[in-house]
């Protein structure tokens, strides 16, 4: 498919879907892209965060309490006590995801802000977590999934210094993806996030674009830093058309000053790699990257071929492995998310040197989250799979102004 660079710092692939994918009112194209349970005393589903462990269903089932109609004024913003969210009460496939209209809006700690979610993005870690691969370090069930968020601040904690009500922000809501990730994630109308994990949304990006970036761009950036990548070095990116790989290409070229960037993808995605800045686009369906004549200072493996990746790295080089087997000199890491990384990269996003890459089959409306996950789990997505709009009323209010 032909790759296009839009003026709003997003790379989109042609053709987009028609607006018929959602039953909600269509928005202008400039904003809307066509388209055995544990519990916790801090559970976002608990009305007083102290419900009995033996009654987890009570947290997400419809309630006759009058509290569901109660709203709290926050500056000029009203925050309901309950929200719509996607929830799972057990580990398993996509069918364990349930939509609920009666999930308690999470409380805000002193160092947190409450974000009204406008857009969210899906990551492989989301479905691997739902499948129970990280049970030993996961937060308690039931879970509202989702790491990536873009939205507007509607409430601030007492120790918050740099953000205020009305700020448009984006970020990864869990500092450690695998170590106690938040129980109440971004696939909801509201989510509570530490101030340090967020950055102001670049004005040149819409919410869908911004939501696609945090976890992927922070993983790409931290991986390059850990590998000691710097100006004048060369890099080979495996799965260059994926969510992380597409950003590794751009960061290596535009931010770190790579001398040469090579990347792998299937035949139909080679032009995309070149448009992102790859000097060499390798069609993995026709040639083996490990047979390439050149060797690279860094190989960034975003697909799970670490044992082959070590064959094309120079002596003394590094191999970053995100998934699969690790062989010397490869290493694996779990990203530490921080808003400071996003803030550092914002100027590159503002001037279009770094571009969000959204899968052409999205964004998926909020009521099609299960479909979005099913698509992501095929392994065929290009760039990021985005859910948008989540809170459509904010977009409509902003347009009205």
Image: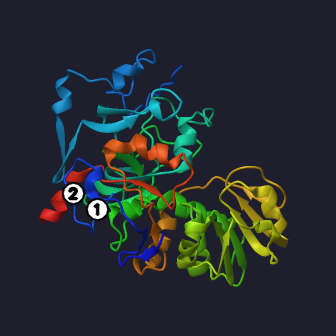
Identify the residue at horizontal 25%, vertical 60% (top origin).
Answer: 166
Note whether 268 is above or below 155 in the view shown.
Answer: below
- Most extreme residue toward the top, as rendered? 54
Q: How far across and how far down the image is residue 295, in percent?
A: 81, 75
Q: Alpha-carbon neighbours of circle 1 within 10 Å: few (<14), some, or many (≥20)?
A: some
Q: Earlier in the sequence, mark 2 or mark 1?
A: 2
Asked if the residue at tag 1 contacts the one at tag 2, i.e. Cβ–Cβ closer than 8 Å, the answer is yes
Is residue 180 visible in the rendered structure shown here?
no
Asked whether, in this view, residue 222 is left or right of residue 144, the answer is: right
Instruction: Pick the residue in front: 165 or 221.
Output: 221
Asked whether, in this view, residue 116 is left or right of residue 12, the answer is: left
- Most extreme residue toward the left, as rendered? 400
Q: How far across and how far down the image is residue 72, in percent?
A: 19, 41
Name the residue carrying label 1.
Answer: 32
Instruction: Pick the residue in front: 175 or 212.
Output: 212
Instruction: Pick the residue in front: 260 or 78.
Output: 260
Classify the position of the C terminus by image quarter.
bottom left
Is residue 335 visible in the rendered structure shown here?
yes
Asked whether, in this view, residue 225 is left or right of residue 36, the answer is: right
Note whether 39 is above or below 207 in the view shown.
Answer: above
Asked whether, in this view, residue 128 is left or right of residue 373, the answer is: right
Identify the residue at horizontal 24%, vertical 36% (top origin).
Answer: 81
- What's the mark number on residue 26? 2
Residue 350, by quadrant, is bottom left
Q: Secondary structure at mark 1?
A: loop
């Amino acid at each position: 498919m032909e790759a296009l660079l839009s003026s709003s710092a997003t790379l989109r692939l042609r053709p987009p879907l028609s607006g018929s994918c959602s039953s909600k009112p269509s928005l202008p194209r400039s904003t809307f892209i066509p388209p055995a349970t544990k519990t916790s005393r801090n559970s976002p589903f608990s009305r007083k965060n102290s419900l009995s462990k033996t009654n987890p269903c009570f947290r997400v089932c419809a309630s006759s309490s009058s509290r569901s109609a109660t709203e709290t004024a926050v500056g000029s913003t009203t925050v309901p006590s309950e929200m719509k969210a996607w929830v799972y009460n057990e580990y398993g496939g996509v069918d364990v995801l349930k939509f609920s209209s009666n999930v308690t809006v999470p409380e805000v700690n002193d160092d947190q802000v409450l974000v009204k979610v406008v857009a969210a993005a899906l990551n492989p870690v989301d479905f691997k977590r739902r499948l129970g691969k990280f049970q030993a370090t996961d937060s308690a069930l039931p879970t509202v999934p989702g790491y990536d968020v873009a939205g507007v601040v509607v409430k601030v904690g007492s120790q918050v210094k740099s953000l205020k009500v009305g700020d448009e922000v984006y970020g990864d809501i869990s500092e450690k993806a695998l170590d106690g990730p938040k129980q109440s994630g971004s696939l909801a109308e509201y989510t509570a996030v530490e101030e340090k994990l967020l950055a102001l949304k670049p004005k040149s990006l819409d919410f869908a674009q911004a939501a696609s970036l945090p976890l992927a761009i922070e993983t790409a950036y931290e991986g390059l830093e850990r590998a000691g990548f710097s100006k004048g070095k060369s890099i080979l990116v495996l799965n260059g058309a994926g969510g992380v790989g597409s950003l590794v290409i751009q960061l290596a070229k535009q931010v770190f000053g790579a001398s040469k960037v090579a990347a792998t993808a299937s035949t139909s995605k080679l032009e995309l790699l070149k448009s992102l800045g790859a000097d060499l686009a390798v069609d993995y369906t026709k040639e083996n990257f490990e047979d390439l004549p050149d060797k690279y200072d860094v190989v960034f493996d975003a697909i799970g071929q670490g044992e082959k990746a070590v064959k094309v790295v120079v002596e003394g080089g590094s191999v970053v492995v995100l998934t699969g087997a690790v062989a010397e000199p490869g290493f694996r890491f779990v990203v530490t998310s921080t808003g400071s990384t996003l803030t550092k990269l914002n100027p590159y996003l503002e001037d279009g040197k770094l571009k969000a890459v959204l899968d052409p089959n999205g964004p998926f409306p909020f009521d099609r989250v299960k479909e979005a996950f099913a698509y992501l789990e095929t392994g065929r997505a290009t760039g990021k799979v985005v859910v948008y709009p989540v809170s459509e009323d904010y977009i409509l209010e902003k347009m009205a102004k």
